[in-house]
Image (cartoon, rainbow, N blue to C red):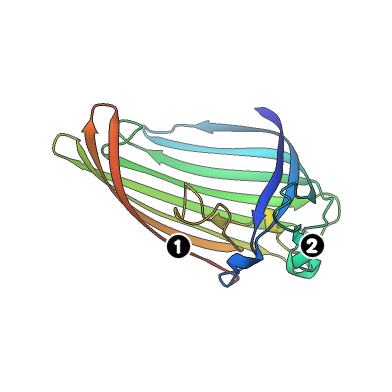
């Protein structure tokens, strides 16, 4: 179980879809209260199955980075669904996770997770949607674990009912240290996204590794 208050005063926004323009960088602030819980069971070793529920109160405002304009200055509200939202949400979720990495900083094995989430707009009945996320990671070690090839494939997709829209701040993003390294965080954003990564890691000496990596990904409106 958890409760938190998260305050992000200057989040990047470049527009939605794969054709977003780097020159359209703007920012916004988002503050969110979270309350929720999650439970799982292990029917067999390495397999975790569970579900959870969360209450979210996101509130958006003007970004605090004076170097960039606020989102509404560059984008009309019709192009940024949820930018003026005051909706509260209940997120109900189910997940399946398989984890047989050895060790957790993996030299071999795999980690696979699949999440289904239903976001219900409890305030305005405009932003109810479903989201599915899958993340598959596989590790191949050799030379006594001093060399590792790490592969990852992740995808996210969503659907909405008639007259409903997915808020932009709940859409999957690409960019930053965890996804498309070399692009700014949240550089690409849309209702659907796919990511592939490959790494070659080697032990320089105990406690220090090096890595070569290649990332590829794309967001999509449909």
Per the image, the residue denoted by label 2 is: 72
Judge left or right: residue 187 versus residue 206: right
Judge left or right: residue 84 versus residue 102: right
Identify the mark at residue 194; answer none if there is no mark. none
Residue 14, picture quadrant: bottom right
Is 71 in front, or is 37?
A: 71
Q: Is residue 113 above or below residue 84?
A: above
Residue located at (74% from left, 40% from top): 32
Q: Position of residue 25 (x, y in %)?
A: 65, 61
Label 1 Cα neighbours within 10 Å, binned few <14 / some 14-19 / many ≥20: some
Question: Considering the image in quadrants, where does the N terminus appear?
Answer: top right
Question: Considering the image in quadrants, where does the C terminus appear?
Answer: bottom right
Residue located at (60% from left, 69% from top): 21
Judge left or right: residue 61 versus residue 157: right
Mark in front: 2 vs 1: 2
Per the image, the residue denoted by label 1 is: 217
Is 214 in front, or is 120?
A: 214
Q: Position of residue 189 (x, y in %)?
A: 60, 61
């Amino acid at each position: 179980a958890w409760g938190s208050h998260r305050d992000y005063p200057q989040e990047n926004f470049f527009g939605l879809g794969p054709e977003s323009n780097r020159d359209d960088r703007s920012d916004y602030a988002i503050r969110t209260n979270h309350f929720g819980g999650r439970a799982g069971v292990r029917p067999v070793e390495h397999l975790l199955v569970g579900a959870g529920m969360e209450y979210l109160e996101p509130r958006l405002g003007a970004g605090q980075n004076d170097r960039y304009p606020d989102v509404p200055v560059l984008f009309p509200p019709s192009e940024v669904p949820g930018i003026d939202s005051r909706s509260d949400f209940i997120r109900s979720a189910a997940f399946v996770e398989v984890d047989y990495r050895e060790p957790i900083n993996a030299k071999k094995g795999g980690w696979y997770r699949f999440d289904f989430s239903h976001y219900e707009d409890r305030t305005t009945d405009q932003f109810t949607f479903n989201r599915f996320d899958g993340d598959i990671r596989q590790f191949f070690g050799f030379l006594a674990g001093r060399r590792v090839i790490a592969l990852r494939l992740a995808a996210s997709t969503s659907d909405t009912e008639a007259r409903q829209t997915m808020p932009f701040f709940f859409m999957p993003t690409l960019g930053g240290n965890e996804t498309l390294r070399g692009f700014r965080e949240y550089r690409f954003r849309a209702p659907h996204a796919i990511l592939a990564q490959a790494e070659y890691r080697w032990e320089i000496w105990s406690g220090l590794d090096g890595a070569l990596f290649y990332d590829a990904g794309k967001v999509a409106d449909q």
